[in-house]
Image (cartoon, grey):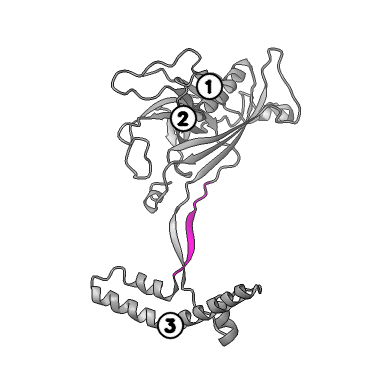
Amino acid sequence: MPATTTLVYPKVAPNPTSKADGLGGGLMSEGGEFPTGSMDYIKFQEFSVDYKGGGGISSTGAKTSTTNLNECYLYVPPSVSAAYGANYNPVAFGALGIEAVKNLQSTSKEEIVKSLQDAANAATPEALFGTIASGISGVNNLLGIGGSVSAGAASAVGTGLVFNPYTEQVFEGVSFREHNFSFKLVARNATEALEIKNIIKFFKKGMLPSFDGGPATGAAALPAPAGGAGSTTGARYLKVPNRFNLSFVRTNSVGLPTGVSVSSKSLGDIPGLYRFKPCVLTNVGVGYTPDGQYVSTPDGMIPAITLDLRFAETAMVTKEDIDSDF
């Protein structure tokens, strides 16, 4: 199993200004009257999927074999929200269609046939006006006269009534939730500048595919030639990018000034927030001039960067999931 990397921003907790500092006290004063006792993060756990036996299928709810890779912890941004959507489509069944639907669960063939016959008889006016409308439209077309008439239009003008289309809102599924996060990463020293650079690389690499020579068939697959990106053999396939497990976590081991601890022993859940389904990363946006002006350090690092991330869940949220805080 390859070695994994843990990235954290910020590693040092902010400390409220102490009374002794007065108006000139710094936000990072270690002598704060009320030091930060815990910090909340979003944990981004990258993982790979074992595609053998349909491991890439998420719609069945079955568990898949995965391998955890690198992980990143970023502060909880100012804007955090979750949206839930259900998809409905209006469908006009008509008189005959609505009768057919009403008897879908009937076990009696005779009952179904009688119901459809009754519905067909009841639909005679629609059929009559449909014939009239078709005749009018046909004559118009024959004579080259513009105009198109429907059964409903003929009934409305001739009788002052329109046919009930028996329209129903039909449930078609659930939208996959999407999650958007915006961060501003400001380096306070060279160590943090390097950490921020690695964080950006972490998300870029996690979102993108790589070239692959394809699966083995019998004997081991042929290795991709040198410079595989320019070879049809080495670039025959694109390897599907990795996925991410997201979670809100709190660490109570802040440890100024050495930095926070994000070990399994120091992390806890945040029950007031929500849980995530496994996600794919669909967009990474990096801004190198967040304050409207280009700034760099003597060694060429960018001290302030904005990072925008968009994730899409790979499994739908159901009623049962709500009881599990999704």
Mark 1, secondary structure of its residue: loop
Point out residue 283 in the picture as x, y percentages from the top left corner.
Answer: 56, 35
- Labels 2 & 1 near each other (Cβ < 8 A): no
Q: Is residue 156 above or below residue 197?
A: below
Q: Is residue 227 in the magenta section?
A: no
Badge 1 local density, few (<14 within 10 Å), some, or many (20+)?
Answer: some
Mark before the other along the chain sequence, 2 or 1: 2
- Residue wearing tag 1: 259
Q: Which amino acid does label 3 sit on?
A: Thr
Q: Which residue lies furthest to the right in this view?
A: 293
Q: Label 3 to label 2, Cα distance in Å? A: 58 Å
Q: Residue 199 in the image: x percent, y percent? A: 55, 24
Distance (Cα) linking label 3 and label 1: 80 Å
Q: Is residue 91 magenta?
A: yes
**Which residues, given as a range, are shown in magenta?**
82-93
Answer yes or no: is residue 205 visible: yes
Crowd tier of the residue under label 2, counting other residues whose Cα lies within 10 Å: few below 14, some 14–19, many 20 or above: some
* Residue 263 visible (yes or no): no
Query: Farthest residue toward the front?
Result: 143
Q: What residue would you read off at disc 3?
A: 124
